[in-house]
Every structure is written in structure tokens, then in C-alpha cells.
Image (cartoon, grey):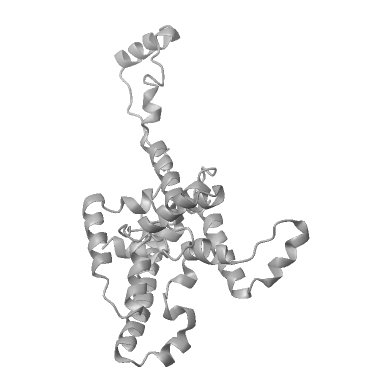
Amino acid sequence: MAEDVDRPEDADEVEEEAEPEDIAVKEEKSESPRRFKKPTLSNPLGLVFNLRMLRRVVQILFFVAINGYIFAAWWGQDWLTDYWTSVASHLPTLPIIAPLEAPFAVMAGSFDTMLREFTSASFPFFTLGAMIIILVILGRSACGWVCPIGTIQDFATLPNRNKIRPAPATESELRKLKAYVFFFVVFLALWVGISRALGTADALIELLGPLATAPFDPFNPAYILFVLAPEQNWPTGLDSLWILQTWGIVFWLQLIFAVLIAIVAIWFPRWFCRWLCPAGWFYGL
């Protein structure tokens, strides 16, 4: 996935030795009035079209749009909610991680959808076709500009200017982890799908539990935040905090994992995308 890491300038650069004539010229320049110094921001509109600022704006807009009609539901606009619901079934999946099972989802991720189609014993022709077309046209920009989990990590890392960067060899080894995750979850999805096609899936589904429907979902931060979290009963005040006791231990562990993704990203930008996300590895093939 696209990385948003600010690399400091090399502090060990050695300036070439200046000739005497150069020194004289530099002294004359240093004595010139400061009023002739060119302003740092010569074009105020340049700030608007700054690529990084544009990226942040696009990330926020897509973060809202992916779960678009949640705001319509809050505002009581039933017609708008019905519109988003009807539109969602006709939109192509995007090369991001975003489950369409989310109660307020409008757009879904290609990888999430592909796994569910595999486990249901159907081949994801439309999903893969749309994904390939988008990747050919836009490349992996969706990972850096659209994916909600990438957006969460990017905004988590913004306040900290002192990032931790593993050594190149360590980074290379860590990036291999997401390939292992990819092959593991795809293997499970195909195993379940083939078993369904052969009519022998009952015992396997019982054995795998939630992994049988979508093997990546229990570890997918987008699924945890946008599907599981809205399904829980949430306290509405101090007098209803006891509701938290009704949450299962499994959901607590999943929620802690999702929160840790944002916390660790403060020091390791997009660490989940770089090291663990199987969708990012798949989109980069």
C-alpha cells in the first residue's frame, strides 16, 4: 500500500569547498536587504492544490462515503437511505478492505467480497474483473487514497514527526507476513467452497466456525469496526456502562486489536498495510 512517510534530509552531506571568489559573492548576497527576499508562499492557491492536502480530503470523503447513508439514517431521511441501499448493490467493488455486510456500507472491498464468493462455492468473475480494471487504470492508489483502514492509520500518525523505520532487511522480512496471511485465508475459503460444491461442507463449517464464512473477517479491522461494533449494544450514559459486560471476550480481543492498529501506526506508519494486510499484497501482484 501507499506509504506516507516523511524522510528527513541526510544530515551528513558535505558541502563543497568554496573558492575565494564564491565567498565574496556570498558575502555580497548576505548583505542584500531582506526586503528583496522572495516570499516562501508565492502562490496562495498552491496550498489548495497541495497533493498531500488533496489526499487527506479525498481520504475523508471516501471514509464517509463508504458508509454513506449512516448520516441519512441519523437525520431521518428515509428516501436517502433507500437510495443508498439500492445503489450499493450495483456499485463495483474497490481494491480496498471494506465489508459490504456493514449495516451502513455503500461500497465494498474486492478482497472481502472475493473470499465470501469463494466460500459460497461461486467464482468471483465480476469482482475480479472490476478489480483488475480499476487496478490497471488507477494502480494501487485506492490503497493510499480510499481504504478506510489506511486512512485511520494515516491520521493516527500525523501528530508524530519521529517515525520508527525498521532496517531494510527487517522491513523486507516483515512484508512477507501478509503473503502468508493471504495464502492461509484463501486456502480456507477455497477449501470451504470446494466442500460446499461436493456437498461435504457441514463438518468443516462446524469446525471452522466464523472462519467458514469469510476467513479474514475475524482479523479484519474493517469488519471489526464497521460490522461487529455496530452490532453490539452500546451504553448511552454512565448509568448504562454495565452493558459493556455483555460483550463477549472474543469481541473485546478483536476491538483491542483494531485499536492497536491505530496506536502502533503513530510510530510505524501504515504498519498493518505494509506487514499484515493480505488484500494489499494481492492488489500489488
| 137 lies left or right of 266 | left
Q: Residue furthest right?
A: 239
Position of residue 15 relative to residue 107, above or below, is above
In this rendered view, identify the residue nearer to me: 149 or 173.
149
Position of residue 35 relative to residue 273, above or below, is above
Can residue 5 be seen in the rendering of this structure?
Answer: no
Q: Which residue is drawn at 41% across and 36% down?
A: 53
| 142 lies left or right of 259 | left
Can you say which quadrant of the picture contains the C terminus? bottom left
Q: Residue at x 51, y 44 (%)?
A: 158
| Total numbered labels | 0
Can you say which quadrant of the picture contains the N terminus? bottom left
x and y, in percent, of residue 80 in the image = 45, 50
Q: In which quarter of the view is residue 125 placed?
A: bottom left
x and y, in percent, of residue 110 in the image = 33, 63
Can residue 247 be seen in the rendering of this structure?
Answer: yes
Q: Which residue lies furthest to the front in this view?
A: 79
In this rendered view, identify the residue nearer to me: 283 or 174.
283
Q: In which quarter of the view is residue 235 placed?
A: bottom right
Position of residue 110 relative to residue 25, above or below, is below
x and y, in percent, of residue 218 in the image = 49, 72
Q: Which residue is drawn at 54% across and 62% down?
A: 258
x and y, in percent, of residue 234 in the image = 65, 62
